[in-house]
Amino acid sequence: MASFIQLLVIFSLLHLSLATRQLSEPTKDEQETEMYKFHYHNGPLLTGKISINFIWYGKFKPTQRTIISDFITSLSSSTSKHATNQLSVATWWKATEKYFSLLKSKKASPLFLSLGNQILDESYSLGKSLEDKHIKQLAAKGDQKNAINIVLTAADVAVDGFCSSRCGTHGSSLSSKNTPSKGKIYKFAYIWVGNSETQCAGQCAWPFHQPIYGPQAPTLVAPNNDVGSDGMVMNLASLLAGTVTNPFGNGYYQGPADAPLEAASACTGVYGSGAYPGYAGNLLVDPTSGASYNAHGANGRKFLLPALFDPSTSSCSTLV
């Protein structure tokens, strides 16, 4: 995972530092450079009131569900007593507003996320080995109007590509129920994140676990004392930022459409100032537990959240 992180970070920094396009006819190299800039591709972003629905696939402890649910609740500034604190989940999320403010089209309704329904599938209805089609099938169980459906797979569930090439993903699918009048078909956004604690914590729960490859820096203590769940929050945070700013593959992203770097994935491996490959950056440390974090959340929670790419400065922005 560390090697992959290194490549992504170096890849991003190299392309972000390239000169702007010249007015003369671009060369092939200049055309390639232009492709790797962070661009808006004229598609819709998610706006208005959006509910976050969870589909819990497999067995999760109640505490694990609470940790991840509290993260979603923390996105709303009105739910956290640290809302006025610059080091809050709500402040971190507010950075995504810059993407919306850059749009020159008619002003849309502000985005507001809230915790919606939670569906438990503890019987492994589709088995313990899933493919992308199964993830879409599970995501379709949630409401599909004004919603993001998040499929969370337990530690004993294998998903195609999990650990080998991804820790989670986001996408969209055509609605299959609850369609509006006149039978109109529309797209809904979904996210999948896996619990990597027993399968590949070194790849998907770094820096709370020793990386499989690359620099072997000391591991950090997870803020909620659950490597799997805290790792899922980090990955979910990244995918959620990518979902609202690039929900249907034609929003904001950098690079090719089939392998885009988005609002958070463009800053992979960066959690605090001074970060470099193998080092997450300068973080806060809880004096009692020794846990590392960078954001306060609802119900006294602490979280470690990824840096977000700032489209106005073309740089990775961190809370600390």
Image (cartoon, rainbow, N blue to C red):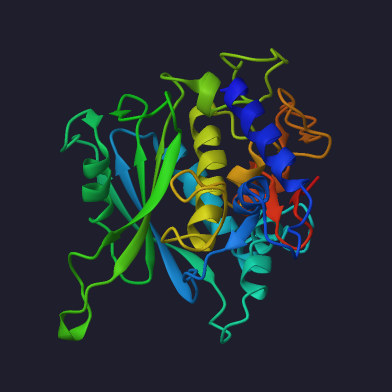
**In this picture, is 299 found above or below 62?**
below
Q: Which residue does the image show at 78% across and 35% down from the upper left?
A: 283
**In this orientation, does residue 260 appear?**
yes
Residue drawn at x 65%, y 54% is 34
> Where is residue 155 drawn, in percent x and y?
37, 26
Q: Position of residue 36 (x, y in %)?
A: 62, 49
Quadrant location, the C terminus: top right
Q: Is residue 311 above or below residue 197?
A: below
Relative horizontal placement of residue 184, taking residue 21 as reference (left or right): left
Name which residue lies at 51% across and 70% down. 42
The foreground one among 110 and 291 is 110
Q: Position of residue 43 (x, y in %)?
A: 47, 69
Above or below, comparing residue 107 to residue 133 in the picture: below
Is residue 269 visible in the rendered image? The answer is: no
Total marks shown come to 0
Q: Is residue 176 shown left or right of residue 211?
A: left
Q: Quadrant of residue 193?
A: top left
